Image: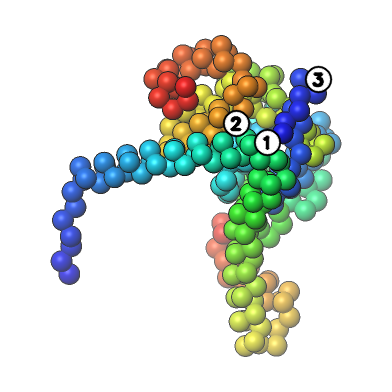
């Protein structure tokens, strides 16, 4: 695998699969409107080659006002919300009340983008320290590996542990180990970290 | 019908061993990806992921073909009819 580091960002060129295209198309809508986001799901592992698919891609967004959200809603283009067809409900009943909205390509159900507003201090940190990856020159904002890997271990299903281990094996040299250890300590998963990663 | 005896201890051990084997395979796969150029590993990944998508589309088109052979309705009319039959949450 060839990854380049350019001014703190990673550059990865690969043959894009359907999931990559889906993510690029949707996140470019967010970028176009100026909604800060971070990809936090198993997609991060898939992006770097993990050989599995996913029904949903999780995104944490910076909180925005209704007008900005309406801009996104009115410019969905080939996408549609599969939870509700009403923008007011989508904003107030879902995003503002801490629930996720899901967007898919029109007339399709999967894959879908599961969007939430940031809620916790950890979400805020993740957004602030997002890792920029240029995938075939398209900009994507990812959860920093130092929290992405421990958080997957914290979630703890076999699939999550596999994702964490795979990411660590592939990206070890790009990970700030001290920072990752600190997150393992805070999440109380030091034993899992020793067992599955190191 | 006579159900087989299930030894949960044995199954737990099997599950543990199965996970261990998967992690071993994952390590081999990660090594392979690290040592291949991006075109090689990502082309294989694309085939695997897109194949899943194609299977879903194939089922959809197969169903449409079946319905079309039994009706004079257009594809749009059929899709609309299917949509109306679906539970709103599944649309």
Task: Give the residue at x 70% y 83%.
Answer: B73
- CA gap between label 1 and label 2 equals 8 Å
Q: Is residue B23 visible?
A: yes
Q: Secondary structure at mark 3?
A: loop
Alpha-carbon distance for marks 2 and 3?
20 Å
Of mark 1 and mark 2, the one earlier in the sequence is 1
Please tell me in which quadrant of the rendered image residue A148 appears.
top right
What residue is shown at x 69% (from left), y 50% (from top)?
A: B43
User: What is the total number of numbered labels drawn onto the structure image?
Assistant: 3
Query: Are the residues flagged by discs 1 and 2 in contact, CB closer than 8 Å?
Result: yes
Whole-percent x and y of residue A60? 64, 31
Residue nearer the viewer, A50 or B71: A50
Q: Are marks 3 and 1 on the same chain?
A: yes
Q: Chain of mark 2?
A: A
Q: Nearer the viewer, residue A100 or A89?
A: A100
Residue A85 in view of the camera? no
Tell me the tag on residue A170. Answer: 2
Name the residue: 26% across, 41% down: B13
Task: Please determine whether, in this image, residue B66 is positioned above or below residue A61.
Answer: below
Q: Quickly name the residue at label 3.
A: A7
Q: Chain of mark 1?
A: A
| Residue to which mark 1 is pinned | A1
Q: Is residue A115 left or right of residue A72?
A: left
Q: Residue furthest front?
A: B35
Rendering coords of residue B17 (x, y %): 33, 41
Q: Are marks 3 and 1 in contact (CB under 8 Å)?
A: no
- Callout in the foreground (3, 1): 1
């Amino acid at each position: 695998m060839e990854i380049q580091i350019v001014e703190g960002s990673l550059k990865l060129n690969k043959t894009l699969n359907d999931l990559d295209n889906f993510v690029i198309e949707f996140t470019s809508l967010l970028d176009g409107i100026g909604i800060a986001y971070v990809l936090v799901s198993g997609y991060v592992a898939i992006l770097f080659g993990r050989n599995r698919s996913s029904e949903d891609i999780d995104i944490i967004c910076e909180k925005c006002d209704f007008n900005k959200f309406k801009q996104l809603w009115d410019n969905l283009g080939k996408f549609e919300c599969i939870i509700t067809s009403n923008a007011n409900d989508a904003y107030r009943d879902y995003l503002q009340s801490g629930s996720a909205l899901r967007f898919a390509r029109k007339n399709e159900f999967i894959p879908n983008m599961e969007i939430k507003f940031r809620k916790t201090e950890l979400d805020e940190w993740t957004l602030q320290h997002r890792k920029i990856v240029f995938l075939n020159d398209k900009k994507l904002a990812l959860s920093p590996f130092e929290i992405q890997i421990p958080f997957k271990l914290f979630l703890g299903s076999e699939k999550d542990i596999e994702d964490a281990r795979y990411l660590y094996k592939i990206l070890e040299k790009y990970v700030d180990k001290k920072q990752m250890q600190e997150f393992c300590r805070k999440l109380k998963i030091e034993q899992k970290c020793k067992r599955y990663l190191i | 019908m006579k159900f087989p005896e299930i030894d949960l201890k044995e199954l737990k051990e099997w599950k543990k061993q199965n996970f261990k084997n998967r992690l071993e395979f994952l390590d081999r796969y990660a090594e392979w990806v690290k040592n291949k150029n991006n075109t090689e590993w990502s082309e294989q990944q694309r085939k695997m992921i897109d194949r899943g998508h194609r299977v879903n589309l194939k089922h959809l088109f197969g169903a449409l073909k079946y319905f079309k052979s039994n009706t004079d309705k257009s594809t749009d009319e059929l899709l609309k009819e299917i949509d109306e039959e679906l539970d709103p949450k599944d649309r």
